[in-house]
Image (spheres, rainbow, N blue to C red):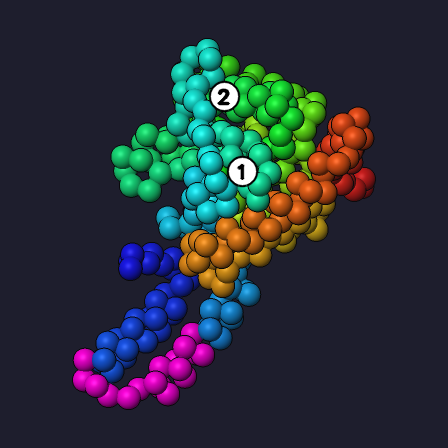
Amino acid sequence: MAERSYLDFERPLMELEKKISDMKDFSIGESIELDGEIVSLEKKLRRLREEIYSGLTRWQIVQLARHPKRPYTLDYVRLIATDFVELHGDRNFADDRAMVGGFATIDDVPVMIIGQQKGRDTKQKLARNFGMAHPEGYRKALRLFRLAEKFDVPILVLIDTPGAFPGIGAEERGQAEAIAMNIRDMSRIKVPIVIVIIGEGASGGALGIGVGDRVMMLEYAWYSVISPEACAAILWRDAAHAAEAAEALRPTSKDLVELKLIDKVIPEPAGGAHTDPEEAARLVKAEVVKAIHELKDIPVDQLLSERMAKYRVMGEFEER
């Protein structure tokens, strides 16, 4: 069994889980009946987990969305889809490994799946550029959107990025233009588009593949125009104020469904998606399949009209 990573606010859970594990080992090794004590501790663990996760701050939710064991795009593809065939390259410059996509099947329905992919270890993180796509990544995504349209298959987008890559080379090759082109053209793609924010949804890096008919978000994901650290660096000139910035940005799933910027929150297993990736994938798959079936019979003109109207009504302000 892989060793679990813990965030700072999860330390009480770590201590109790270790105590349960030690007691089980002792019970087996010494042939002593400790089932009653173990059951009691497991009940205490469930209560403690519920207490901790029901009271998370926005900054703690941001940290949870970045958990190193959290499932990434290709994990969900493996768990919810079959027959995945990855497609590569933007047919112009390069293949960006931070952006992945290809045809697959979900419950006998052909789909195009596109999303950002992070890495687990140092080698993978560098290869995937930490999930931060270059312009060629967004142009690859647009190529696949158009391919899905050509073959009349719905699109599933899984968003998980700390932002588009801000390097000089990316800017020279038209990062902003590539993102803007995607936003424009996604509003016109003539097949259903279902979006799920599975982890981080930061800035234009997320919006570049984030225009769709249904936008859903995992319970402990976040979605915002800017990261809390970057916001704090601008407003307070100190990234140490990230927790305050997170409270002001209101980037959590609960916030965004209240603000009517997303359509639905997908619950996660107790303790977050990383504690039970199979269950997290099951919950995601159920909502994705439901959304695709709701959208696939809508006439194209109506689908595009409703998609455009969805984004036109976003945003509220007060005049003083």
Please state which of residues 54 and 2 is positioned toward the viewer in this rendering: 2
Q: Quadrant of the image for the N terminus?
A: bottom left
Magenta span main SS: helix
Question: In the image, is 232 to the left or to the right of 125?
Answer: right
Q: Position of residue 274 (x, y in %)?
A: 42, 54
Is there any visible trace of residue 278 in the rendered image? yes
Neighbours of disc 2 within 10 Å: few (<14), some (14-19), many (20+): many
Q: Quadrant of the image for the C terminus?
A: top right
Residue at (47% x, 69% y) in the render? 49
Under mark 1, the amino acid is Thr
Corner quadrant of residue 305 = top right
Is there any visible trace of residue 62 in the rendered image? no
Q: Position of residue 232 (x, y in %)?
A: 50, 41
- Does residue 58 belong to the magenta stretch? no
Residue at (24% x, 88% y) in the render? 32
Residue at (58% x, 56% y) in the render? 267
Please report whichever mark, 2 or 1, sits nearer to the chain's N-terminal start. 1
Q: CA distance from mark 2 to mark 1?
A: 20 Å
Label annotation for residue 140: 2
Residue carrying label 1: 105
Label annotation for residue 236: none
Under mark 2, the amino acid is Lys
Question: In the image, is 112 to the left or to the right of 26?
Answer: right
Segment tinted magenta in the rendering: 29-45
Mark 1: secondary structure: strand
